[in-house]
Amino acid sequence: MATSSLSSDDRLPAYVRLRDTLTARIAAGEWTPDAPIPSEMRLAKEYGLSVGTVRKGVDGLVDEGLLERRQGSGTYVRAPSFDATLFRFFQLREADGSQRAIPSSQLIVRAVATAPEEAAEALGTTKVIKTLRLRSLSDVPVLYEEIYIPADRFEGFVELPASSFGPLLYPLYFERFGVLVKHAVDDLSFDQASATVAQQLRLKAGDPMAVIRRTAFDLKDKPVEWRIAHGSAAQFRYRSEIS
Amino acid sequence: MATSSLSSDDRLPAYVRLRDTLTARIAAGEWTPDAPIPSEMRLAKEYGLSVGTVRKGVDGLVDEGLLERRQGSGTYVRAPSFDATLFRFFQLREADGSQRAIPSSQLIVRAVATAPEEAAEALGTTKVIKTLRLRSLSDVPVLYEEIYIPADRFEGFVELPASSFGPLLYPLYFERFGVLVKHAVDDLSFDQASATVAQQLRLKAGDPMAVIRRTAFDLKDKPVEWRIAHGSAAQFRYRSEIS
DNA sequence: CCTCTAAATTCATATATATGACTAGTTGAC
DNA sequence: GTCAACTAGTCATATATATGAATTTAGAGG
């Protein structure tokens, strides 16, 4: 192959431009997580760079968690896998033992809807699909979620058979709708349980709740999901490391 | 200078060993934040490495936040500065406007004490110095802290004049006691206000509180401080980014 | 068909070198 | 004395190359 050219502003360093170009190619779905992307040698030849420069560019995407190196094998697109991380805010231990419980999900409602104000603001549209979901640990409800996704990027979501839903949504977004969630922002606060939330989580209205508002973004930093999750404050536990 | 040798296991890559060696030299207080560490060229010669390898080693410490590069000038030890980050858990806005308030600190008690169970477990000793501190935004108390530090590493802490205390403790630890806090772990949970806490923060006993337990570690990963902080859950707000 | 071996491929580490960008200090003209 | 130009030092980017480690593939031999 003759040398392709790197996109974007040529005043930027080559490794930055390579990073942007590769991100775009990943976003376009050119490679799946199953097969490796071209080797460092190939990329170097394709773009007319040295392997060192290619390596530095790829390093950036590996640090971002977009790519994954396997020595001797190749470099692979990393499948999205952090949907479950809302549970990182809550104790996963059972009341009795120290064993970790397995999270499960139960869909309550899926429907085309008009986005509430916060969701509309985050997503930039009012035409959305609304999903209500209850997440449990060993059949004990822990987390109640309202999830909003833009209707135009998720056509057919409401009609999907329930069997296609696993415990994680983001892999589904990727496989069925080509939407890859690259990062998300969680906003945490405390509040009291509303009647609806209390009923779903088998608590009393007014009980202290941890509230997590999440906006998720795709590779182009466009918002693709907004959700609000409620969990009992008593079970809330979070660890944050700083340096 | 003749080539010095890198410490630690020589089966490890050179850049890792350089990282460890530099960390040890920083821990020993060989360089202050005011003056640059030796240039990449010098380090390369000193340890018999190429500049590329030195660069990769230094990169690691820059990523960890231990060093700071300044193009054209040099590479510097970064002064500790994240003490104030407990405030990242709380709204810094005033009730009325959007302006950010300036945090202030007020010491209530400093005394040699026996560590409570949790602190003793975290620090590995019961001989500690206990500090009670109230932190405010624009004279409104926001955070009540109990702080425990090992007595043997902080001799003379109790006798320090109040004027030597700024809003941040970690720079003081470093300047007066040679203790550099490299990272810390915050554990967040939720509870109700005790009588003591309520009084200090001008709340009612039983009011919902956010509780932050922090263990701070030095460069050798030894615990050097344990604290527990209480703040009103109503003001609690935290943002977490994931990717 | 299976197993072991050898070779090819790919990422990981390391060296040597060159040029550009930025900073800080020095020199020199005015 | 002031300010501009120059210069040496330092990090930033980039190339070219070599060797090692881990994995995969191909093939020989049973």
Image: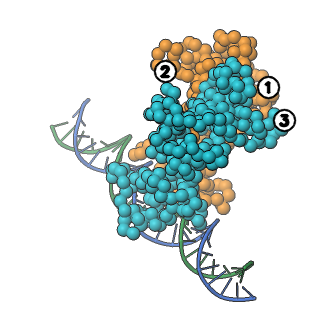
Chain colours: A cyan, B orange, C green, D blue
Residue A238, image quadrant: top right
Q: Secondary structure at mark 3?
A: loop
Question: Mark 3 or 2, which is nearer the eye?
Answer: 3
Closer-to-camera residue (A57/A124):
A124
Q: With respect to residue A174, does B111 lie above or below?
A: above
Give me the disc on residue B116.
1
Q: Which residue is mark 3?
A: A96
Amino acid marked by disc 3: Asp
Quarter of the figure that contains the N terminus of chain A: bottom left
Q: With respect to residue B80, does B104 lie above or below?
A: above
Closer-to-camera residue (B227/B142):
B142
Q: Which residue is mark 2?
A: B100
Question: Mark 1 or 2, which is nearer the eye?
Answer: 2
> Pointer 3 and pointer 1: residues touching (CB < 8 Å)?
no
Chain on which label 3 sits: A
Hey, which residue is sitting farthest right in the picture? A96
